[in-house]
């Protein structure tokens, strides 16, 4: 068997944390999945997001700003001219018969993250949520043999960014690392909660295998709702595609779904091409020249950009001289990092210079404190520990008052 090389490109959607939906004034309830109303279907709806004829959409400026902020953090090119397009298709979760998306002029192009080149990031509206419960679980429909499908439009029209990477990833580890790094970035920028289990971040993987210089036929896998699932779906596809080629068969270009319970991918539909969607510029929205909108200028975006993981890693090395493992704990658990920083801030300036003391502090937090808090609950909790108290304890250890 000859060597097969796997190639992966990712398409990642993230729901943006805005107060209102993308093109109407409805509350964006999807950002708070714990809100009671979010559990009541079809309450965050209006004639615009329900696609009633004669209604007019209005662009959510904050959603545009959030996508540009991500582009700024990735070192991408931000568009000057941009427009929205209609992507036409019929599906019960798309009330208008088309989705307002972007085609030719995405807001963001290029850039990179974790060694992966970004193709583009564009802005679109989310679809409604469909569920297909078994009839026996639905009051009044218990005897329905066909079952039912339900549609909840609360999510329809929620701002959604779509990031597409170049096909430059060659292992499941690299793919998962990129997705995790993007999730952190979105959370640090406060652009999205990006929780995969809640569907706030959705990863689609495109995978091909080849034993020649040329790319193989790619397969797109959807319905992945955790990083672990992404890795497993990639491994599964690699094995499946190699087996097909080894048998002398070809890989069909198609969209497949990930079955979490069975741990397999299954064919959903043959892949449609861009021309099937009959994209055309959305006639109900103005085209935008972003340099004419003061809040969206690059300089303004940079000035208002919160610290991102890459910057925090550098700061933690320079300021505290910590080892990479500790720094990663603080990068992925922001509250623990904040606790560490506030403990250090309670230590006298002179003692702060003592690198061993800073290291000791970090050791107690990353091993002992986290270890203890794990016994209490899933979330990090300090119990009764305050940063002042912790700093005092560290000083007592240093002075040999306690071991
Ligand atoms: P499509 O028009 O089918 O949507 P795109 O060119 O837009 O294809 O690419 C979609 C995604 O698929 C991108 O993330 C891209 O990197 C990835 N991709 C493209 N070609 C391949 C390939 N041969 N193998 C794996 N991924 C690929
Ligand atoms: Zn609405
Ligand atoms: Mg595409």
Image (spheres, rainbow, N blue to C red):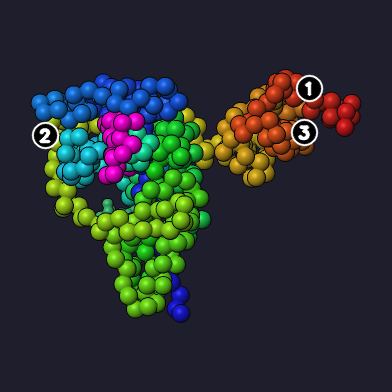
389 horizontally vs 338: left or right: right
Q: Closer to us: mark 1 or mark 3?
A: 1
| Between 139 and 402, the one nearer to me in the picture | 139
Q: Earlier in the sequence, mark 1 or mark 3?
A: 3
Does 358 lie within the magenta span? no
Residue 20 position (above or below residue 68): above
Ligand 1 quadrant assignment: bottom left
Calculate the distance from the C-alpha at mark 2 to the C-alpha at mark 1.
64 Å
345 horizontally vs 265: left or right: right
Image position, residue 41 (x, y; %): 32, 27
Q: Earlier in the sequence, mark 2 or mark 1?
A: 2
Residue indicated by mark 3: 357
Calculate the distance from the C-alpha at mark 2 to the C-alpha at mark 3.
63 Å
Residue 193 position (above or below residue 2): above
Image position, residue 40 (x, y; %): 35, 24
Please report the bounds of the magenta region as a residue range: 139-162
Q: Which mark is residue 283?
A: 2
């Amino acid at each position: 068997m000859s060597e097969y090389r796997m190639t992966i490109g990712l398409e990642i959607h993230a729901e943006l944390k805005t107060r209102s939906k993308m093109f109407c004034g409805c509350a964006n309830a999807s950002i708070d999945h714990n809100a009671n109303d979010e559990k009541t279907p079809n309450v965050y709806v209006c004639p615009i997001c329900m696609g009633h004829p004669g209604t007019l959409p209005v662009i959510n400026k904050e959603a545009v700003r959030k996508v540009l902020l991500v582009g700024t953090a990735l070192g991408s090119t931000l568009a000057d001219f941009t427009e929205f397009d209609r992507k036409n298709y019929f599906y019960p979760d798309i009330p208008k018969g088309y989705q307002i998306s972007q085609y030719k002029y995405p807001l963001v192009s290029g850039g990179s993250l974790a060694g992966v080149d970004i193709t583009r990031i564009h802005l679109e509206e989310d679809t409604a949520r469909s569920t297909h419960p078994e009839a026996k679980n639905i009051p009044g429909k218990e005897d329905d043999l066909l079952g039912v499908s339900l549609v909840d439009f609360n999510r329809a029209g929620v701002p959604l960014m779509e990031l597409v990477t170049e096909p430059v990833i060659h292992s499941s580890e690299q793919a998962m690392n990129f997705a995790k790094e993007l999730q952190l970035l979105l959370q640090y920028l406060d652009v999205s909660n990006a929780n995969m289990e809640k569907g706030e971040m959705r990863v689609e993987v495109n995978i091909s295998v080849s034993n020649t210089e040329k790319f193989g036929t790619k397969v797109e896998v959807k319905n992945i709702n955790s990083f672990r699932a992404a890795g497993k779906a990639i491994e599964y596809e690699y094995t499946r595609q190699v087996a097909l080629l080894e048998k002398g068969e070809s890989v069909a270009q198609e969209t497949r779904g990930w079955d979490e319970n069975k741990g397999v991918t299954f064919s959903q539909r043959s892949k449609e091409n861009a021309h099937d969607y009959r994209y055309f510029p959305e006639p109900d929205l103005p085209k935008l020249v972003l340099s004419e909108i003061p809040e969206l200028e690059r300089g303004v975006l940079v000035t208002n950009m919160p610290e991102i993981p890459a910057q925090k890693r550098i700061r933690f090395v320079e300021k505290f001289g910590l080892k990479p493992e500790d720094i990663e704990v603080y990068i992925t658990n922001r509250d623990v990092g904040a606790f560490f920083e506030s403990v250090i801030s309670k230590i006298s300036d002179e003692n702060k210079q003592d690198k061993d003391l800073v290291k000791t502090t970090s050791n107690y937090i990353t091993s002992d404190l986290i270890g203890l808090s794990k016994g209490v609950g899933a979330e990090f909790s300090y119990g009764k520990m305050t940063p002042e108290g912790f700093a005092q304890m560290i000083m007592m250890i240093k002075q040999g008052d306690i071991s």
